Amino acid sequence: MEAASKSNADREVVLSRTVKAPRALVWKVCTDPKHIDQWWGPNGFSNKTIAHELRVGGQWKYTMTYVDGTVYPNLVTYTEISPIDRLVYDHGDWENPKMFQGSLTFTDSEEGTVVTIRLLFATKEARDETVERAHAIEGGKQTLARLAEYIETR
C-alpha cells in the first residue's frame, strides 16, 4: 500500500479504534473466517465466507447480506501479510476485483490493540462516491465497533 501522504489524503478513508485485547488475538479474529463472519461489516449485515486463503495472492471470497435480503458479493485479494502487524489487500467484487486498496494495521497500546483501517482509492471521485453511496466512513466505524464488541464480550 502506498504510504500515507498529503497527496493521498483526498483519496483515503482512515479509521482507527482501540480494542481491549492482545494483538495476536485481534489478528486471529480478523483473519479466521469462523470469527470474521460473526462481526465483519456495518450494522445490519451478516457475512458468509465462500473461500479463504490467507497468503499473498490468496483470496477471501464472501457475501455480505443486508437485513432486507440484498446480497453483496465481495472479494479480497491479499497483497501483503505481516502476521499480527498488517494486512494489505485489493478489495472489490467478483466482477471487479480491484475497486480500492485496503489495509488493516494492528498496533499495541496500553489499552489493548489499535486497529486501523485504511482504504485508498484511485481517485478523489471514487473515494467520494464510495463515502456517499456506500457510507464508507460510518460503515467503517460500525465495523470496528462490531469487532470490539465481538472480542470484548467473549
Image (tube, helix red, strand yellow):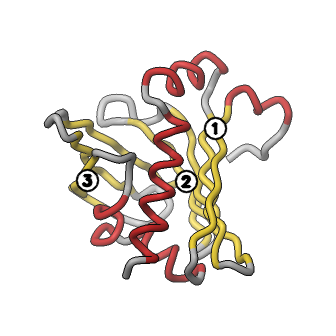
Which residue occupies the extreme left position in the image?
Answer: 69
Label 3: few (<14), some (14–19) or many (≥20) C-alpha neighbours in 10 Å = many
| Residue 117 x/y as whole percent | 59, 52
- Quadrant in which the C terminus is drawn: bottom left
**Which label is found at residue 47?**
3
Q: Tag 3: residue type?
A: Asn
Q: Which residue is mark 2?
A: 79
Residue at image position (46%, 77%) is 152
| Structural distance between the alpha carbons of marks 3 and 2 | 22 Å
Give the secondary structure at mark 3.
strand
Q: Is residue 30 above or below residue 65?
A: below
**Which label is found at residue 138?**
none
Q: Is residue 112 above or below residue 54?
A: below
Label 1: few (<14), some (14–19) or many (≥20) C-alpha neighbours in 10 Å = many
Q: Tag 1: residue type?
A: Val
Q: Quarter of the image holding residue 146?
A: bottom left
> Which of the marked residues, 3 or 2, is nearer the chain's N terminus?
3
